[in-house]
Image (cartoon, rainbow, N blue to C red):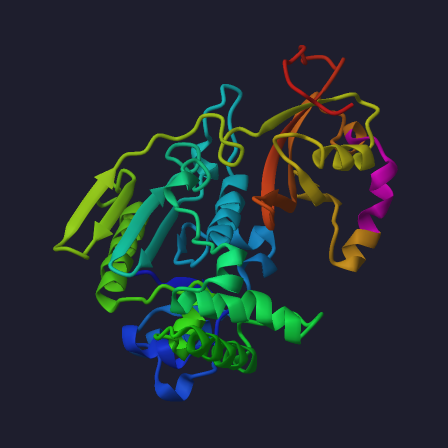
């Protein structure tokens, strides 16, 4: 398609189970970085392309790293990872005084995912089409088994595996965290699950099923992956080249019973905390950066803990690494009004952790800060910190 400069990020290493559904990895590549091997093989096959691999987590990169690209294409396997990249891309979005998105700040995203014979591809234009958070309800909750069923009346192979994983592991390895990527840990869970299954006359416990249940892996099907990845590549090409109208804006594919493809034009949530103009917070000019940070943990719409704060690309306070925390620590006792150059209102970005359904996840939020009593600011009906 003519893409010449591509960066690819993946924290995973190649497993034997990956070999059946793609053409970039070989048996001798097992244990190596997926990103590095994939980049090498594509560059060998396609002339004129430069692919830079990054063997790390997506959260390991600075926010500005993602601002260097014209488009971001997602092939992630979790809701948490999608939410994080979505918030990063939306953080670059700026609005004019009428709350209209500025076109030059829009960072397009193409997202694809598969689950067995089903898949989706979507185009996200922050500020125009729904972002990931706007219709996160599209993703069904993960199946969870009651602990009483696991402990007393297991009926399936999955029950036996989760018993070994969630109950038996802690009984035997008190205080030792289970590592799903450790083959020895996985083998132990498999062995215990087999014993449990034999005890209750249950069949079907295999090592591959144990991996699938513990790591919530849905078997991947090559044809589904090919269709969805082709749809994502085509949408990326249309976005960059302008050769045709892009997808509006969510495509679903179902190959379980025949072939069914449908495109749905979802509507963006105007008050979305992630892709909207930003949560409005009204402050007194005397509020220090420390007080502002503490208020974020109590704000009902944010609930952000341990946030780092930036303004116009400048680090006001950074939680990590230690050297940056030390360099910005003195700002904590200064009024935020002064740190923001005494402007009546401005946009700050905060990154930290938030609690979703009892699970801590990384987040990035855009906040519109307005200072009371400063020329150009009128009273606003918001719940702000003071």
Residue at screen point 33% across, 44% down? 123
| Camera sees residue 10 | no
Which quarter of the figure is the N terminus placed in? bottom left
Residue at screen point 30% across, 73% down? 47
Residue at screen point 81% across, 33% down? 291
Of 149 and 266, nearer the camera is 149
| Camera sees residue 223 | yes
Q: In this view, does 42 lie above or below 350?
A: below
**Magenta region:** 327-336
Of 234 and 306, nearer the camera is 306
Q: Residue furthest bottom?
A: 28
Q: In the visual, does 66 lie left or right of 17?
A: right
Q: Does the magenta stretch include residue 23?
A: no
Q: Is residue 131 above or below residue 230?
A: above
Of 29 and 159, nearer the camera is 159
Q: In the visual, does 315 lie left or right of 302?
A: right
Provide residue 216's location: percent of width, then percent of height.
44, 62
Provide residue 148's location: percent of width, then percent of height.
53, 57
Q: Which residue lies furthest to the left in this view?
A: 258
Q: Quadrant of residue 330?
A: top right
Residue at screen point 29% across, 56% down? 233
Q: Is residue 332 magenta?
A: yes
Provide residue 173's location: percent of width, then percent of height.
66, 75
Which quarter of the figure is the C terminus placed in? top right
- Magenta portion: prevailing SS class: helix
Q: In the visual, does 386 lie left or right of 168?
A: right
Provide residue 366's location: percent of width, then percent of height.
59, 35
Of 245 and 115, nearer the camera is 115
Q: Is residue 283 above or below residue 323?
A: above
């Amino acid at each position: 398609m003519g893409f010449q400069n591509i960066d690819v990020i993946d924290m995973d290493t190649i497993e034997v189970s990956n070999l059946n559904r793609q053409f970039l990895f070989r048996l001798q590549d097992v244990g190596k970085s997926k990103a590095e091997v994939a980049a090498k093989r594509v560059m060998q096959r396609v002339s004129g392309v430069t692919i830079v691999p990054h063997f790390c987590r997506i959260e390991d990169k600075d926010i500005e790293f993602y601002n260097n690209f014209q488009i971001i294409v997602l092939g992630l396997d979790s809701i948490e990872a999608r939410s994080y990249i979505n918030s990063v891309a939306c953080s670059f979005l700026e609005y004019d005084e009428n709350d209209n998105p500025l076109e030059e700040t829009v960072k397009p995203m193409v997202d694809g995912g598969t689950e067995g014979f089903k898949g989706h591809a979507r185009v996200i234009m922050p500020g125009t089409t729904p972002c990931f958070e706007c219709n996160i309800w599209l993703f069904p909750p993960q199946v969870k088994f009651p602990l009483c069923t696991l402990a007393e009346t297991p009926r399936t192979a999955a029950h036996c595996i989760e018993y070994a994983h969630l109950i038996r592991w802690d009984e035997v390895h008190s205080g030792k965290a289970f590592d799903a990527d450790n083959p020895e840990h996985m083998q132990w869970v498999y062995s215990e699950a087999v014993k449990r299954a034999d005890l209750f006359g249950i069949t079907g416990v295999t090592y591959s099923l144990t991996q699938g249940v513990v790591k919530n892996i849905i078997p991947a099907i090559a044809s589904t992956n090919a269709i969805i990845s082709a749809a994502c590549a085509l949408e990326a090409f249309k976005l960059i080249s302008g050769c045709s109208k892009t997808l509006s804006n969510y495509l679903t594919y179902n190959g379980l019973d025949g072939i069914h493809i449908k495109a749905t034009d979802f509507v963006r949530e105007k008050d979305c905390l992630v892709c909207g103009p930003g949560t409005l917070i009204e402050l007194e000019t005397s509020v220090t950066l420390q007080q502002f940070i503490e208020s974020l943990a109590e704000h009902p719409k944010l609930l952000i803990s341990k946030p780092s704060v930036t303004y116009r690309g400048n680090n006001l306070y950074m939680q990590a690494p230690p050297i940056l925390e030390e360099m910005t620590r003195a700002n904590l006792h200064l009024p935020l009004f002064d740190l923001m150059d005494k402007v009546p209102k401005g946009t700050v970005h905060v990154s930290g952790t938030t609690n979703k359904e009892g699970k801590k996840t990384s987040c990035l939020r855009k906040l519109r800060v307005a200072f009371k009593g400063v020329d150009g600011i009128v009273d606003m009906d918001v719940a702000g910190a003071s």
